[in-house]
Amino acid sequence: MTCPPPSPAHLPVSSVHDLADWVAELLPVAVRRQLWTLFFDRDDVQLPMMVPLEGIPERPSRSAVLAWGRALEAVVAEFEVAWVSFVIERPGGAEPNDSDRAWCESLSTLDSSPGLVVRSVLGCTDVGVRPWVVAPAAPASAASASIAGVSSRADQGGLSRDIGGGARRERIQSSPRRLALAEVLPLR
């Protein structure tokens, strides 16, 4: 008997390019201005939840971003999240603009929050999905250990550092306990 291959949703994300490809399956092009948060387990598999924040302003508010970081810390603890990735969705060209750079910088600082690891910030535009910021991360799992390393790459937007590829391995994903997100995450 032949078993069907696992769904891409159950495969580890072994590089930033795999992540961008996966996000492009979920969000092929920008529809409106919003921020998405994706959550990954210690085996680099996306947990079955994504949180959108609609109507983000052109410039991030430091206090609002810190409040979002504190809310994310609760989710990280509840679901044993190993790392997060953000996607800035906005109509327009592929190159990051001043607003995008401000958001990337602000979201990247959340990496210093207790228990919160920010692995990347991607941009989803009219052209599709591409990495804008990729933070070097210490390997937390066998899947992460397969990441070859981090090397700087000159990018026209000047924001990204590239993570080398690694082998994908299959894994069955367990379902996390349900969390009343409305109680933990103030969305407005």
Image (cartoon, rainbow, N blue to C red):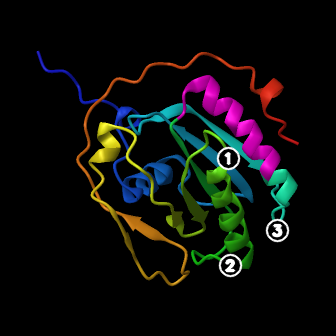
> Residue 32 location, x and y as percent?
73, 58
Q: CA distance from mark 2 to mark 1?
A: 26 Å
Circle nearer the viewer, 2 or 1? 1
Q: State the SS at label 3.
A: loop
**Local crowd size for mark 2, using a 10 Å CA cut-off: few (<14), some (14–19), many (≥20):** few
The span from disc 1 to disc 3 (Cα, nearest Å) is 21 Å
Q: Which residue is mark 3?
A: 59
Residue plotted at (76% across, 37% down): 71
Image coords of residue 6 (percent x, y):
30, 29
Outermost residue, left side: 1
Q: Quadrant of the C terminus?
A: top right
Q: Nearer the viewer, residue 80 or 56?
A: 80
Front position in the image: 52 or 118: 118
Quarter of the image containing the N terminus? top left
Question: The magenta stretch spans which residues?
Answer: 66-81
Q: Earlier in the sequence, mark 2 or mark 3?
A: 3
Question: Which label's residue is closer to the chain start, 1 or 3?
Answer: 3
Task: Please give the residue where the numbered disc 1 appears in the rendered image.
Answer: 113
| Residue at image mark 2 | 97
Q: Secondary structure at mark 2?
A: loop
Horizontally, residue 8 falls left or right of residue 188, namely left
Which amino acid type is marked by label 2? Asn
Q: Main secondary structure of the magenta part?
A: helix
Q: Which mark is residue 125?
A: none
Q: CA distance from mark 2 to mark 3?
A: 11 Å
Three-letter residue code for mark 3 = Arg
| Vertical comparison of 137 with 84: above or below | below
The amino acid sitting under disc 1 is Ser
* Left or right: 2, with 44 as reference point: left
Q: What residue do we see at 23% from left, 25% from top?
A: 4
Instruction: Tell me residue 52's x, y (percent).
Output: 70, 44
Q: Does residue 172 lie above or below 69 as drawn?
A: above
